[in-house]
Structure formats: structure tokens, C-alpha cells
Image: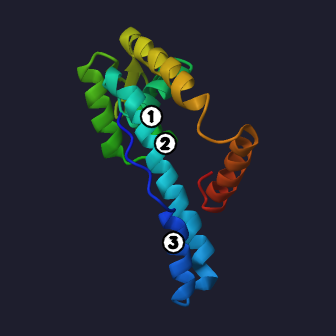
Amino acid sequence: MTQPKPLPADPIAEAHRQWKAHGWGGVADGMAAVTSVMRAQQILLARVDEVLRPLDLTFARYELLMLLLFSRRGSLPLSRIGSLLQVHPTSVTSAVDRLEARGQVRRQPHPTDRRAVLAEITDEGRATALAATTRLNESVFADPGLPENGVTELVDLLTDLRSRAGDF
């Protein structure tokens, strides 16, 4: 992936300065924090997408494969997948459709609940999930772009944010 030319100055720092200059100094730090997290998400997602693209995966489909891989039976009800991944049922259906078309997941009737459908990972899905994990571990997770102590600090801060938001 070709990296864009770096900007000569930090636009978020400039926005922070402008917030203060326009009388919003009391919330300037919060604006800079939110904007920084959103920009960091874009940067990390671009790195992840670059790694997953050759496997024809999105991060959402990768997460679904890993959730199934980690499940006790290799299968979960679609409604449970949506709950665990915190996504709308339509997103689960779309991801399962795509993975099923590639032979990585198959739908199965639930053994005890006729209203429910299970998504079950296939051998192809397991192989793809493991290959993607190897690539992500090497190219992204081993060096997310922060100093080692910064990773722990960031995870702790974001865990607090998610907890306060009622995420868990």
C-alpha cells in the first residue's frame, strides 16, 4: 500500500488550537481525544485491511471466523454471534452469506431450537482464520505502532472508556 505523504503539521493539534481560539477551550481536549481515536482507528483499519485483502477477508468476517474457531463446538447461533460481536443481525447475515459462499462457514439447523440457525466453521474457514491470524500477528499485532508500555496504557484507557459507555 502506498502511504500518503505526511502532512507538514498535525491537523488535530491545529483543530485543538482553533477550538480554544473560538471559545471552546473547555472541550478542546475532549475533541482532540475523540478525533485522535477516530483517526487512529482509520490508520489501524487500513493496516489490517492490507493484510486481510489477499485472503479476501474484511476484519468483520475475520472476527466472525475467529469467534467460531474459539467456540467449543465450532458453531454458534447467528443471534449469539451478533451479540458477541456487537453488530446488527443484518451484518451477521451478510458476513455469514459471504463466508458461506467461499466455503468457510455453513449454516446448520439448531439441534434443539427450530427457530435458530447456527453458523459453523468449516475446515476451509479454520485454515483461512489461522492464516489470517498468522499474518495479522506478524504485520499488525506484534507492532501496533506504539511503544510497549503505551500498548498496555492504551488498552487500559480504552477499557475504561468502553466500560463507562456500558459496553460490558
Q: Is residue 138 above or below residue 95?
A: above
Query: Which badge, 3 or 2, comes first in the chain's sequence?
Result: 3
Location of residue 118 in the rendering, given as x and y in whole percent from the top left corner: 39, 26
Q: Residue at x 61, y 84 (%)?
A: 25
The residue to which callout 2 is attached is 44
Image marks 2 and 1: residues in contact by CB distance under 8 Å: yes
The residue to which callout 3 is attached is 14
Q: Residue at x 49, y 42 (%)?
A: 44
Q: Is residue 9 above or below residue 19?
A: above
Circle 2 packing at 10 Å, graded few (<14), some (14-19), many (20+), is: some
Which amino acid, mark 2? Leu
Circle 3 packing at 10 Å, graded few (<14), some (14-19), many (20+), is: few
Q: Is residue 114 above or below residue 126?
A: below
Q: Is 129 on the left-hand or right-hand side of 145?
A: left
Cα–Cα gap, marks 2 and 1 = 6 Å
Mark yes or no: residue 107 visible: no
Which amino acid, mark 3? Glu
Q: How is the image coloured?
A: rainbow
Which amino acid, mark 1? Val
Secondary structure of the residue carrying numbered label 1:
helix
Circle 1 packing at 10 Å, graded few (<14), some (14-19), many (20+), is: many
The residue to which callout 1 is attached is 48
Q: Is 115 on the left-hand or right-hand side of 139?
A: left
Q: Pick whichever, 157 or 78, lies toward us.
A: 157
Answer with the quarter of the image where residue 1 lies: top left
Q: Pick whichever, 66 or 145, lies toward us.
A: 145
